Image (cartoon, rainbow, N blue to C red):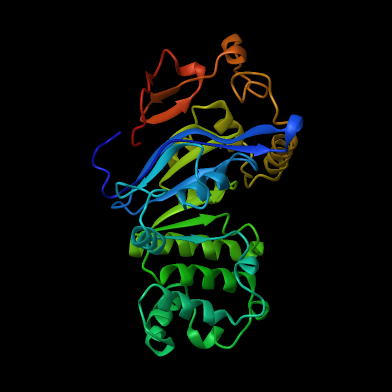
Amino acid sequence: MSSMNGSKLVVNGVTKIFKMGSGFSRINITAVKDISLEIDLAKGEIFTLAGESGSGKTTLSRIILGIIEPTYGKVLYRNKNIFAMKRNERRQFIKEVQVVSQNPFEAFNPLKKVESYLFKTAIRFGLARDKKGAIPHVEKALKAVGLSLAEINDRYPNELSGGQLQRVAIARSLITQPSMIVADEPVSMIDASLRMSIINLIKQLNEESKINFIYITHDLATAYYVSHKIAIMLKGEVVELGSIDLLTEPLHPYTELLRTSIPEPDPDKALEAIDKELVISKRNFDSDFACKFADRCPSKMKICEREEPKNYIVNGRIVKCHMYSNKGIKMTNSIQI
């Protein structure tokens, strides 16, 4: 681990175990396991967490946001443990690390006017003393997402489209001038015709304002279009981590399987991809094997059944797979890719 972490978000050996049930029926569920990664805030990049539903993406994002405390490991933001921050440090962290949720209609109270959230955010974080003073901040944020105060003023959430409301949610996150925005499946609940407008907005904000994004998605097509780096998650673990180019030349068999689920222009291949995607999503995720992908892996070896794979550095990326035990460098601690 680099000691120069002053401008980084560092996730170090994070594991989260949820205890379910009670008495003799009590069980432990490991939602994320031993995850380490670094994001250099000075670079202004889009870092994607990708994988199937239930892979641990949202749990990891909630740990990064400080909403859920990990069972083991820690998260450092600018050299400070986010779960041991003082009150003023926590306030600054929330100001700098904002979130855009999956469903914009759940992010806003249907009985409150939309603009009230924007004014409240500006006042809460000390950017203005009152509504009048907050207007310039609100207008600037709305302009950045292609809206104006006149368009949303005096309107309730149900009076806006899903795309408009998600733009308002992004505008609210921009008011504090964050260094990072965690966007959890930001287009999954939006009409298909409007999804690319939100994806293009994220890309534009990153390029023009150098805002870092953690983009959480199961959609590899949008991930490839918008991201700089990507972590592929499977059953709570990161199995491949590196630049977005890993989607074109995957090393891990699971990444290859996910890649084949991306629809292609050819109708016949698209149908084949959809069929594979359904097989992926419906397959029983439980496995008795040490490797969590062994039950579906076309390259499975005997060692995969009895021994959990290590992390190896191969061609500038991290791969968790036995196939690279003789081809890569075994990791002993977390590094930045």
Which of the two residues, 327 or 66, is positioned nearer the viewer here? 66
- Quadrant assignment for the C terminus: top left
Which of the two residues, 268 or 195, is positioned nearer the viewer here? 195
Task: Give the side of residue 334 with respect to residue 164, left or right.
Answer: left
Outermost residue, front side: 23
Question: Measured from the top left, where is residue 334 in percent x and y?
Answer: 36, 31
**Quadrant in which residue 336 is drawn:** top left
- Quadrant assignment for the N terminus: top left
Q: Is residue 63 above or below residue 15?
A: below
Which of the two residues, 334 or 88, is positioned nearer the viewer here? 88
Which residue: 73% across, 38% down? 21
Question: Measured from the top left, where is residue 100 in percent x and y?
Answer: 52, 61
**Quadrant in which residue 130 is drawn:** bottom left
Question: Measured from the top left, where is residue 74 in percent x and y?
Answer: 41, 40
Q: In this view, does 227 lie above or below 116?
A: above
Which residue: 43% across, 80% down? 138
Which residue: 47% across, 65% down? 201
Question: Measured from the top left, where is residue 81 in percent x and y?
Answer: 36, 46
